[in-house]
Every structure is written in structure tokens, then in C-alpha cells.
Amino acid sequence: MSEYLLLLRLSKAKLLETIDALRKLPRNPSPGVDLDYTMNIFGTWHVAVWFSSNNSTQAIEFINKKIGQIPGVIDAFPVATFPHKGKLDKES
């Protein structure tokens, strides 16, 4: 599965309502998508969503059909990620 970071810009008038709706998304919000977690961030973007998807089509459908339909979501910026798997070596 590919992993994605989705940055969201929210309407300030609906900020708390939208964050609450995002927090209530199920673990598997659409076919082929696993939601890892959401987090508040500060700056240009308001919320980040980490999720995995079987393919980019399913990822785009999740963003458009689930996230994009939540009242208060103004803009979404998906980033395909390539996380480092396994333990990082620590230098002494």
C-alpha cells in the first residue's frame, strides 16, 4: 500500500465542526483506504491526514468523495510519501 499525507485547509467559520467530522472518520473510510490518523497543524494548512491506499485511484476517490464532501474543507493537497521502514541507526 502507498502512504499519503493529505494537507487540508479549513473554513475558519466551521473549523471545530470540520475537525470533529474528520476525527469521526472510520478506520476504512472507503474501499482500499486505511486511515492512520488525523492531526491538527498550524500555519497555512489546518489538518493533516495520514492514510494508506491500494492505488492512486482509490486515494483520489477517497479525497474527492469523502474528504471533499465534508462541510468546511476548502482545499486539499495530497502528497505521496515514501517513509523509511524499519529502525533507524543511531550514531554514538
Image (tube, grey):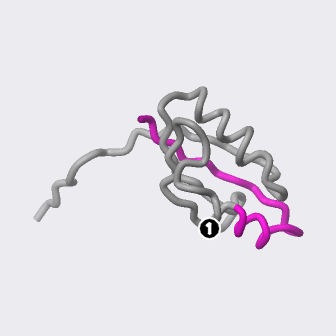
Q: Residue at x 65, y 68 (%)?
A: 42
Circle 1 sits in a helix, a strand or a loop, which is it? Answer: strand
Residues shaded magenta = 1-21
Give the residue at the far bottom of this rendering.
Answer: 16
Residue 52 position, x and y percent, is 48, 42
Q: In the rendered view of the protein, which quadrant contains the C terminus? A: bottom left
Q: Is residue 55 magenta?
A: no
User: On the rendered structure, is 23 left or right of 86?
Assistant: right
Amino acid identity at mark 1: Asn
User: On the rendered structure, is 90 left or right of 52?
Assistant: left
Residue 47 position, x and y percent, is 65, 61
Give the residue at the far left of this rendering.
Answer: 92
| Residue 15 versus residue 74 in the image, above or below | below
Please name the residue that numbered disc 1 is placed on. Answer: 40
Residue 50 position, x and y percent, is 52, 52
| Residue 20 versus residue 50 in the image, above or below | below
Quarter of image, res 48: bottom right
In depth, the one of 53 and 15 nearer the eye is 53
Q: Residue at x 68, y 64 (%)?
A: 43
| Residue 12 versus residue 44 in the image, above or below | below
Q: Residue at x 67, y 34 (%)?
A: 61
